[in-house]
Amino acid sequence: MADAKEKIIEVNDLSISFKTDHGILHAVRGVSFDLYRGETLCIVGESGSGKSVTSKAIMGILAANAIVEHGSIIYRGEDLLQVAEEQFHKIRGHKIGMIFQDPLSSLNPIVRIGKQITEATLINNNKLKLMFDDLISEDLIAYKNCIARKDIALKHLDDELDALKREKAEVLKHGTPEQKAEAKKALADKKAANKAAASEIKAKFSQDIVVLKKKLEETKKTAVVRVAEYKASVLAKYSEDVKKENEAYSAQISANPSNKKQLEEAHKAKLAELEKTKIDSLKITKAEAKRRALEIMKEVGIPQPERRFKQYPFEFSGGMRQRIVIAIALTETPEILICDEPTTALDVTIQGQILELIKKIQKERNLSCIFITHDLGVVANMADRVAVMYAGKIVEYGTAEEVFFDPRHPYTWALLSSIPDVDSKERLDAIPGTPPNMIFPPRGDAFAARSRYAMNIDFERQPPMFKVSDTHYAATWLLHPKAPKAEMPKIVSERIRNNLDAGPRGAEIRARLFGQAEAKPAEGKPAEKKPVEKKEPKIEETPKPKSPKSPNPTANKKKGGK
């Protein structure tokens, strides 16, 4: 179904790290996903899994200490990672909006709500300037992006040099004399190599920059002419309409002089209307911005918007503040809405209202939505597709039905085991341990140390993405053909069985996901699929799964799991 839709955003192999006092923190590691028009993609995972960092990369609001190591975020054929900041403000808010998790910290406490909602509209109120910017945007973006690519390439050289300097500092503290000499020589060689590489980069981009700049100047000249023609046509139409109105007024006075006072009032009203039409064609007035804001406030369910328009954030409840934040995000009619845990600070009743509001607005405006949360209940209510993240990587990816009714990754099983359910009688399972320190990312599967299904290979090699179906993938060695069968937790299998047996919808989901040939998911036996990688990883011996009774991987490893 998703394949027939228009692809709005394509994230490819995105990796982001942060410079910290303790070292490089690897926050996002090789994340890839697509977003289609009108759908909701939910990204779910524990705190620190990289969900918010991924969304901030899409919005272009990463912290200053962030390092985009590689990857791309393609939006309308353009890589957002290489868009210059001067141009990103035309995308941020206008094309891609974002709702943050704490509405109170998102609003200015000493500025009235109305001003905050209309601020973006009034900043961009000059329609002639907006028209000019639209006409030159394609060539301007190409020119700025070329400069940005050059700067990114040069910055990459600087980052490599900084890393080598840090290594040298460590060696000078703790190394032998030979190591110190070697470190100094390596740094000197790197500086010389970087100087040559920088010259090559500048030479490589300089010619393209000159060509693109020349094309941009020509486009600007054409745009100036077109904007002037539009302004002249608006003024000419206004003059013509005023002339016709004056002639009509004179004719009416001549024909009916006794009604002069009424005709004069109607004439003044008509002239005022023509003046307003002319101004509205050239700029967005405060009155027009307020009218739009009141409409959006009504749309998001704020009662008495005329009175609320003049109030301050502290005069609103938490749910109403979140509605205000949503209204601000919708002011510029974006086509993508990123919701970063927008219901975390709200109570359960208000959460439901905000979720229903977002679903309603998404349907009415055909928005594409990225919904970030750690709450699987929210995911079940909102998602078309789900990406499960752990330690900076997507470990399972599929439709909402596939992830909830046919989960394959042990981490997904653990998440599903830890949420309460009215029908299940099994005791909830807690996930043992804590997420790994991503300054020192694990060598193999990041979840192995917390998983009772971990095998020896999980501690040695990262699993590739195994294909379960055309829309369902999971990064776990349990899906390797040589891996032993592993049963999902009983509490999860019982829930799936109960839901699939509950009425016609359960039967539809069963038929859609499993058909007649495949075993039911309640048995907890993943189908044996070949990995996506062409070169199949070698497993000399079939590894034995760890005992479900012990979450301690080292204990099982010592007992001889191979």
Image: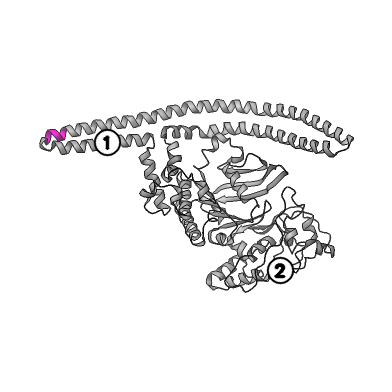
Per the rendered image, the range of residues in magenta is 251-256
Q: Which residue is mark 2?
A: 487
Q: Is 29 positioned to the left or the right of 37 in the image?
A: right
Say what amino acid the circle numbered 1 marks: Ala
Q: Earlier in the sequence, mark 2 or mark 1?
A: 1
Q: Is residue 242 above or below residue 312?
A: above
Q: Are marks 2 and 1 in contact (CB under 8 Å)?
A: no
Q: Nearer the viewer, residue 114 or 501?
A: 114
Please, what secondary structure does the residue beneath circle 1 have?
Answer: helix
Q: Quadrant of the C terminus?
A: bottom right
- The stretch drawn in magenta includes residue 253: yes
Q: Which residue is mark 1?
A: 272
Badge 2 crowding class, 10 Å Cα cut-off, few under 14, some 14 to 19, many 20 or more, is: some
Q: Nearer the viewer, mark 2 or mark 1?
A: 1
Q: Is residue 98 visible?
A: no
Please, what secondary structure does the residue beneath circle 2 have?
Answer: loop
Q: Is 9 positioned to the left or the right of 286 in the image?
A: right
Seen at 71% across and 42% down, the residue is: 21
Q: Nearer the viewer, residue 10 or 331?
A: 331
Q: Quadrant location of residue 499?
A: bottom right
Q: Is residue 52 above or below residue 456?
A: above
> How far from the left and from the top, in percent, is residue 201?
69, 29
Q: How many marks?
A: 2
> How far from the left and from the top, in percent, is residue 346?
52, 57
- The stretch drawn in magenta includes residue 540: no
Seen at 79% across and 38% down, the residue is: 167
Seen at 57% across and 31% down, the residue is: 143
> How far from the left and from the top, in percent, is residue 557?
82, 62
Q: Label for residue 194?
A: none
> How far from the left and from the top, in percent, is residue 264?
18, 35
Say what amino acid the circle numbered 2 marks: Glu
